[in-house]
Image (spheres, rainbow, N blue to C red):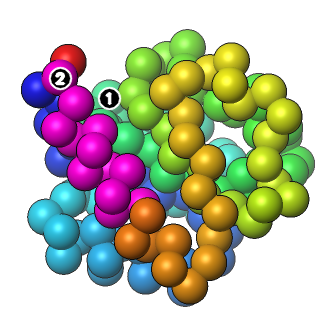
Amino acid sequence: MTLIKTILIADRNPRILAFLKRELNSEGYCTHTVENSKQLRQWIHNHPTCDLFIIDPDLFSDVGLYDVLFTCRRMTALPIILHGLPDDYPPHWNALNPIRFIAKSGTSIEELKKVIGAWRRTPA
C-alpha cells in the first residue's frame, strides 16, 4: 500500500501555501512549502523523503513547467498534482504520469484531499 505522509507544496501565493498547509496538516500529513522554482529544485535535491508534490504551474513560467516536471519525474517517481488555473493546464502532462491536474477554486481543497486519499490507498 502506498503511504503518503510528506507533501511538498509549491506555490507563489503565500496565502494559498498557508491554506493548503493548514488543511493538509489537519488531515495528518507533514507538509513543506516552497515559493519559487529554485527552492523547489533545491528541496528535491536535499530531501529525498517526500511522498507527493502539489505544484502551481504558474510558478514555473520563467523556466518552463514541462522541464521542471520532467526533472522531478526523472529524480523520483512520486505522484504530482498540478494545482492551478485552467489556463495553466500544460499540454504534454500526460507523458509524465502519475500527474493529476486540479483547477484552483474555492472548493479545490476537497478535491485535493480526495485525490491524495485515493493515492494513499492505492496498492504499490
What residue would you read off at disc 1? 48
Up-down relation of residue 73 to residue 29 (above or below): above
Residue type highlighted by circle 2: Pro
- Which of 79/32 is in front? 79
- Give how far across and how far down residue 70 sits, in percent: 67, 22
Residue found at x 68% / y 48%: 37
Residue at the spot 42% in from the left edge and 19% down from the top edge: 77
Q: In the picture provided, is 23 more to the left or to the right than 108? A: left
**Residue located 29% across and 68% down the image:** 24
Question: Which region shows up in magenta?
Answer: 112-123
Q: What percent of the width, then of the height, locates residue 8?
A: 41, 51
Left or right: residue 121 versus residue 88 is: left
Q: Earlier in the sequence, mark 1 or mark 2?
A: 1
Mark 1 touching mark 2, by CB under 8 A?
A: no
Quarter of the rendering occupied by the C terminus: top left
Number of numbered labels in the structure image: 2
Does residue 45 appear anywhere in the picture? no
Using the rendered image of the protein, determine whether residue 30 is visible from the camera's viewpoint: yes
**Alpha carbon distance from label 1 to label 2:** 21 Å
Tell me the residue that label 2 is attached to. Answer: 123
Q: Which residue is at the far top?
A: 74
Q: Secondary structure at mark 1?
A: loop
Q: Nearer the viewer, residue 36 or 13?
A: 13
Quarter of the figure with residue 21: bottom left
Q: Quadrant of residue 63?
A: top right
